[in-house]
């Protein structure tokens, strides 16, 4: 379990990845994004999660340049979008991401969602880019156990990370156990469930015992479950608050109370809906 905000986990290919990062989905406004990233860097965040789909790679790239951060001082994750998948298209999309981020190498490149038709071709493209040294670690997102099983029938490199929806209303415990068995790191997206779960009285009550907010309790619950996290906020106070979770420990009973909030309720599509979808997506 991570003991401090600056802890890393070692991925299955030996690359170190910060356990606790910053999610940049839906931060489109350039000023908002720059202010949020400045606060995040100041608060000690080193991992930044973006995607072609978020349309903010270029602004994030500009920020890295202007902030004067050394390359080994930050870790960037980006992802190939569904309509860019396939062997040639993925390589082209990767090249575009690299240019926008103004980098020579991406730390972690993910397949954003599994797509049935282009499934192996996309992964082969990631393997090629990885072999060429353009990516330090390759992984997937929104892959369920059966997608991982399918991938393993032809993959030369196994995914280092599976970034999946995980929060108290949808804890994804079974997939977590499967990922652990496969030595694939579990990284939670929407670790705060995008907000509504934070209104739960049980979370507030637990927080009061430690002088913490419901959000801090939820993030701490992930860390104690050995799950990596990338909470998103564009509010400076909350960006700092979300980092301040390493000075208390939830009891076994409190962990169970939070586990019991499980409703099997996602904030977004089930992966198989996207997997089989053939109509164009934006
Ligand atoms: N791979 C995928 O398919 C996928 C899908 C979705 C997301 N992601 C990644 O995961 C990251 C996080 O997920 P997310 O953005 O969907 O949701 P999230 O981090 O669970 O929640 C973000 C929401 O919670 C609010 N919030 C943040 N900190 C808070 C706090 N301390 N107290 C109260 N409210 C707080 C934010 O509002 P304010 O900004 O106003 O603070 C925002 O409305 C994304 O940014 C993205 O990088 C990946």
Image (tube, rainbow, N blue to C red):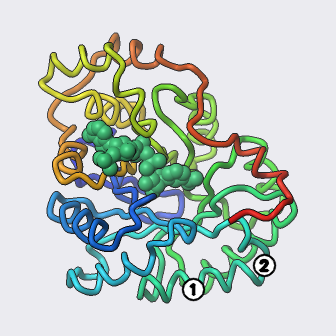
x, y percentage for residue 178? Answer: 64, 37
Nearer to us in this view, 119 or 85: 85
- Which residue shows up at 21% across the image and 38% down it? 245
Towards the viewer: 44 or 18: 44
Residue 92 placed where, x, y %?
A: 67, 86
- Image position, residue 120 (x, y; %): 81, 66
Question: Quadrant location of residue 170?
Answer: top right
- In front of the other: label 1 or label 2? 1
Picture residue at 51% right of the left edge, 37% below the top = 166
Residue 252 figure quarter: top left
Q: Which residue is mark 2?
A: 87
Q: Quadrant of residue 41?
A: bottom left
Determine whether 28 is above or below 249 in the image. below
Element type where label 2 sits in the image: helix
Relative to 245, is 50 above or below? Answer: below
Q: Residues within 10 Å of mark 1 (few under 14, many from 20)?
A: some
Q: Label 1, secondary structure: give it.
A: helix
Question: Can you tell which mark lies on residue 96?
Answer: 1
Q: Residue at x 28, y 86 (%)?
A: 65
226 or 258, nearer to the observer: 258
Q: Position of residue 55 (x, y in %)?
A: 50, 72
- Residue positioned 51% across, 45% down in the render: 186
Count the labels in the image.
2
The residue lying toward the viewer, choosing from 193 and 216, is 193
| Horizontal side of residue 217 vs 212, given as left or right | right
Q: Is 272 drawn above or below residue 195 in the view shown? A: below
Q: Quadrant of the C terminus?
A: bottom right
């Amino acid at each position: 379990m991570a003991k401090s905000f600056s802890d890393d986990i070692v991925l299955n290919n030996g690359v170190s990845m910060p356990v606790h990062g910053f999610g940049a989905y839906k931060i489109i406004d350039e000023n908002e994004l720059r202010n949020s990233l400045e606060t995040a860097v100041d608060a000690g965040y080193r991992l930044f999660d973006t995607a072609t789909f978020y349309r903010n790679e270029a602004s994030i790239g500009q920020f890295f340049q202007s902030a004067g951060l050394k390359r080994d001082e930050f870790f960037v994750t980006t992802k190939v979008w569904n309509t860019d998948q396939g062997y040639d298209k993925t390589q082209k999309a990767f090249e575009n991401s690299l240019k926008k981020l103004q980098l020579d190498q991406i730390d972690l490149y993910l397949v954003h969602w599994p797509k049935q038709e282009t499934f192996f071709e996309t992964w082969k493209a990631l393997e090629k880019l990885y072999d060429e040294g353009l990516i330090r670690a390759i992984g997937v997102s929104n892959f369920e156990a059966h997608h991982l099983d399918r991938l393993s029938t032809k993959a030369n490199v196994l995914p280092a990370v599976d970034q999946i929806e995980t929060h108290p209303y949808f804890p994804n415990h079974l997939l977590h156990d499967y990922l652990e068995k496969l030595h694939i790191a579990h990284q939670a997206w929407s670790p705060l469930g995008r907000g509504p779960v934070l209104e739960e009285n049980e979370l507030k009550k637990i927080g009061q015992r430690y002088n913490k907010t419901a959000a801090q309790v939820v993030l701490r619950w992930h860390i104690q479950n050995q799950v990596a996290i990338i909470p998103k906020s564009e509010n400076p106070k909350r960006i700092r608050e979300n980092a301040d979770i390493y000075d208390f420990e939830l009891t076994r009973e409190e962990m169970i109370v939070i586990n019991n909030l499980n409703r099997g309720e996602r904030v977004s599509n089930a992966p198989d809906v996207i997997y089989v979808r053939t109509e164009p997506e934006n």
